[in-house]
Amino acid sequence: QACLWSLRPGSAGLKWLLLAPMALDALLDPRHGAVVVVEQGNAEDAASEEVCALYYADGDPTDGHRSQNATLFADQRASTFELEGADGAQIEVSQQSDHLRLAGVTGCVVWNGAVVLAKSLALWAGELGLLELEGRRVLELGAGTGVLAVACAMLGATVVATEQAERLKLLSKNVERHSSHRGAAAGPPWAMGRRGGSVDVQELDWFSPGPCIDCDLLLATDVVYTEEVTLALVRCLAAYDVPMLLTVELRTEEVHFCFVEALALAGFLVHRLPPELHAAEVQTRRVVTYVMSRPSADGGACASHAGGGHQK
């Protein structure tokens, strides 16, 4: 996999930075305690062992609250959600909690996984120096309100945030309000933050795959909640051979079993990060982050066609 050239703005005009292929090896350093979830072997065994480790080894972390409304870090009844971004910038996104009553619609509000990953990416890119996003092309599946996409752009990433058609209006509105520019030059894509990042918005549906989107890193949060959606998600993920970070809240044992088994059958290598590696203020056993790759994938950055998004 060749190195990638990225044109970035500098203090003396434009400068070229040579970017090596994206890797998440620093996060998987044995000293950080990452657990191998799927390597090679029986998919059913891997799924059973992961469910037992998460739900039974130290008690049920969900405390019986497995509905999609059991939030920890966001008030879904509020009209807006606020989060501090990179360099002290404030992220504010609108929520549409009244849309939660519609079947299958979840991306109208902020969920725990997006908050956990946004804060943890800032920690890893900053204080811990484990992951550099500046100049990287990031693809987010099921971007929802856009809070994670904006947070990544403020860390310097060039982000493509994807959703189903009916969710694009809210997503675009939330992204645009953080643009560094106004008027005709504003976007899309919308430039934001002090590190040269930007966000573009595209329609993608996991059930109707389209062409792959070029990226160095794939992100998704709060995307494992029904078996049907989970299987569609994994089929789309399997088209990409870039590193992936998925942060999900534990719902039911059955859906999580389906998720891990599907990853194993698709040939993924999967590690789970310990809660202690998340940002301190969002550490919880109810939300887990997986580091994933497909070492057996054929082809280039896109092994086949994929889509992203759902009614989120």
Image (spheres, helix red, strand yellow):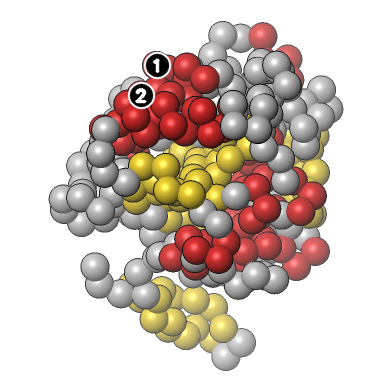
258 above or below 265? above
Total labels drawn: 2
Alpha carbon separation for disc pair 1 and 2: 5 Å
Q: Amino acid at mark 1?
A: Glu
Residue 224, percent across and down? 50, 27
| Residue drawn at 30 percent across, 31 percent down | 43
Q: Quadrant of residue 248?
A: top right
From the image, tell me which residue sits under label 1. 228
Q: Quadrant of residue 95?
A: top right
The reply to whether discs 1 and 2 touch (Cβ–Cβ < 8 Å) is: yes
Residue 103, percent across and down? 56, 9
Pick the front one: 62 or 94: 62
34 vs 75, left or right, is: left
Residue 303, percent across and down? 21, 47
| Residue drawn at 39 percent across, 46 percent down | 270
Q: Amino acid at mark 2?
A: Leu
Pick the front one: 297 or 106: 297
| Residue drawn at 55 percent across, 26 percent down | 312
Q: Among all residues in the image, which is located at the extreme front?
A: 57
In the picture, the disc for residue 231 is 2
